[in-house]
Amino acid sequence: MTRAERQAQTRGRLIDVAKEMFLRDGYAATSLDKVALEAGFSKGAVYSNFAGKEELCLAVLDLIHAEKVRGVREAFTREADLEAQLKAFADWAHDGLGEPRWTALEVEFGAVARHNEWVAAELVTRHREIREAIGQLIEYVVEEAGLTSRLPVPTAAAALLSLGVGLGALRSLDAQVDIGVFTDVMRALIPPAETEAPA
């Protein structure tokens, strides 16, 4: 194994351990010392991969976001028609949207951005990337179905991201919040295909 491969392995291990600890204990209660101990490395190994706890938490959130985006993308790409895609998404969202520990971490770390301009800028960049990913997915769905969006794609993407964040926050407190609201809004954004009148 090369030095670069070992470092990548160490970095991956630190992110995996930090993810579990941040989700379990929260951002404030998780120190780099604790992460290093749990991962079986020295604190120096942490600092050789991350500038500080903020950068490590961003790496954890990047991993979580990638997992969530992949889940949504798979829900839409493994089905052929729009209704089946929306059903697959609703099934995913039932467990994947508003997981309490994830939502709590997002909120707690988001509060850090109030007093840290670098963290704020990094979060803004990531939110833009997520909106772009949602926009690309909307374009894929409507093109595959031969439809159009009622709103410009960037506007629709921003609306869906905002709705997802809001529903996620509500579902983290009340699992009975109906995730069907999300799919209802998606249906409203995409008009049904026109059918020819019978001759």
Image (spheres, rainbow, N blue to C red):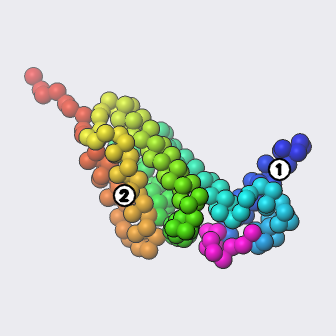
| Residue at far top of view | 199
The secondary structure type at the circle numbered 1 is: helix
Name which quarter of the figure residue 41 lies in.
Answer: bottom right
Residue 7's disc is 1
Above/below status of 59 relative to 37: above
What separation in Å lies between label 1 and label 2 (alpha carbons)?
Answer: 39 Å
**Crowd rating for badge 1 (residues with CA inside 10 Å; few <14, some 14–19, many 20+):** some
Q: Residue at x 46, y 42 (%)?
A: 132
| Residue at far left of view | 199
Q: Position of residue 39 (x, y in %)?
A: 80, 65
Q: Residue at x 44, y 74 (%)?
A: 173
**Crowd rating for badge 2 (residues with CA inside 10 Å; few <14, some 14–19, many 20+):** some
Disc 2 target residue: 163
Residue 38 appearing in the image: no
Q: Residue at x 32, y 30 (%)?
A: 146
Say which label, 1 or 2, has the lower sequence index. 1
Q: Position of residue 194 (x, y in %)?
A: 20, 32
Residue 53's disc is none
| Depth order, front residue of 44/85 | 44
Q: Disc 2 marks which amino acid? A: Leu
**Magenta-tinted stretch:** 22-32
